[in-house]
Amino acid sequence: MAAKAKLSLNFLDYIAAPLWKTIAENLFPNLSLNIRYMNENRKYWQTLHEQSVAKQQAEAAAAAPASATGPSPGVPAITVTPASH
């Protein structure tokens, strides 16, 4: 879902918004309400993107192997001592 939200944000930011803002400012000033709706739509996609990224990060952290955070309880830690020559 994060990819879809990011794609929607990019579409709004780089295609839809510049086009509609130019049309509303120069040709049809009555379209300002549509610009407001587009901005609300962008806020929706931004929130959805942020939630999706946070969920992915939480899932990745939960799926991280135990060795990444230290030894499991009840398992002795292995200590390596360099050999002296």
Image: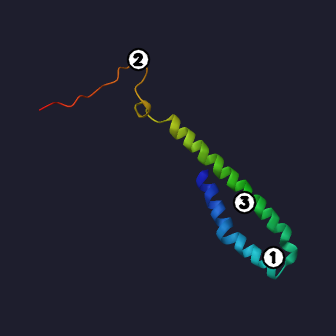
- Please rate how many residues cluster around mark 2, counting C-alpha atoms within 10 Å: few if below 14, some from 14 to 19, many from 20: few
- Please rate how many residues cluster around mark 1, counting C-alpha atoms within 10 Å: few if below 14, some from 14 to 19, many from 20: some
Q: Say which residue appears at 77% left-offset and 64% top-offset.
A: 38
Q: Nearer the viewer, mark 3 or mark 2?
A: 2
Mark-to-mark CA distance, 3 and 2:
50 Å
Q: Mark 2 points at which residue?
A: 74
Q: Quadrant of the C terminus?
A: top left
Of 49 and 77, the residue lying toward us: 77
Identify the secondary structure beneath mark 1.
Answer: helix
Identify the secondary structure beneath mark 3.
Answer: helix
Location of residue 20 in the rendering, given as x and y in whole percent from the top left corner:
75, 73
The extreme right residue here reads 30
Q: Say which residue appears at 29% left-offset and 26% top-offset.
A: 79
Q: Name the residue under label 1.
A: 24
Mark-to-mark CA distance, 3 and 1:
17 Å
Give residue 42's mark: 3
Q: Say which residue appears at 72% left-offset and 70% top-offset.
A: 17
- Please rate how many residues cluster around mark 3, counting C-alpha atoms within 10 Å: few if below 14, some from 14 to 19, many from 20: many
Mark-to-mark CA distance, 1 and 2:
67 Å
Earlier residue among tags 1 and 2: 1
Earlier residue among tags 3 and 1: 1
